[in-house]
Image: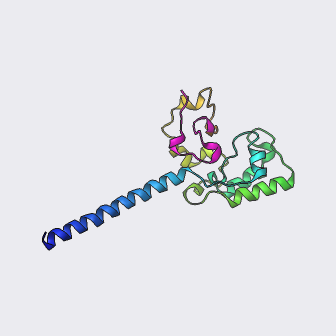
Amino acid sequence: MNNTTKRWVFDTTVWTSAVMMTFVLLIHDVAAESRFPPVANDKWQAECGSCHIAYPPQLLPAASWRRVMSELDKHFGADASLDAASAAGIGAFLESNAARGKRAAVDAGTLRITEAPWFRREHREVAAPVWKGASVKTPANCGACHTTAERGDFSERGVRIPR
């Protein structure tokens, strides 16, 4: 093999490896966007999880969680009031684990996860009848399609669209 051929083989190997590594990293980043590291707070799990899934704090920015917690007496049509100590503890937990980066790029007034731009973008292919189906009823019912939502995993591997 002459030097030109050796150089071509070397260059091709390096470029192919670089492209493959980039691809692997991109896939990892996309998958990481759908899974949230487990966060634990017994009070949050008990209080918020008593009516719906305890939505991972990473789904909304801190400003939105502050507003949600300040309006618990009219929490989406229900009175979810808590004693001051519980509200403060849960609020601090939500804020310290709130969305960062792209997920935090929502209007300061956004209280509904389903109104966040990233949510709409991720669910744009879901047909309107699916949202209104008997087993789903509302886009806020994450667990109807995301079988691992309770664990903070919203990756597509765990999605089962009800028929």
Task: Tally the marks.
Answer: 0
Residue 72 against residue 66 in the figure, above or below: above
Q: Residue at x 24, y 64 (%)?
A: 12
Q: Which residue, as the protein is rendered here, is positioned at the far bottom?
A: 3
Residue 91, quarter of the rendered image: bottom right
Q: Is residue 131 left or right of residue 21?
A: right
- Coloring scheme of the render? rainbow
Q: Is residue 55 left or right of residue 124?
A: right
* Picture coordinates of residue 125, whole percent (x, y): 48, 38
Q: Residue at x 81, y 53 (%)?
A: 87
Q: Residue at x 75, y 39 (%)?
A: 51
Residue 121 lies in magenta, yes or no? no
Quarter of the image containing the N terminus?
A: bottom left
Residue 147 lies in magenta, yes or no? yes
- Range covered by the magenta-colored residues: 143-163
Q: Which residue, as the protein is rendered here, is positioned at the far front?
A: 1
Residue 150 against residue 135 in the figure, above or below: below
Q: Out of 70 and 134, give the one closest to the viewer.
A: 134
Q: Out of 9 and 61, give the one closest to the viewer.
A: 9
Q: Is residue 59 left or right of residue 159?
A: right
Q: Is residue 11 left or right of residue 115?
A: left
* Picture coordinates of residue 161, whole percent (x, y): 53, 33
* Picture coordinates of residue 118, whole percent (x, y): 54, 49
Residue 139, quarter of the rendered image: top right
Q: Out of 94 and 14, give the one closest to the viewer.
A: 14
Q: Residue at x 84, y 48 (%)?
A: 82
Q: Magenta: predominant secondary structure element?
A: loop
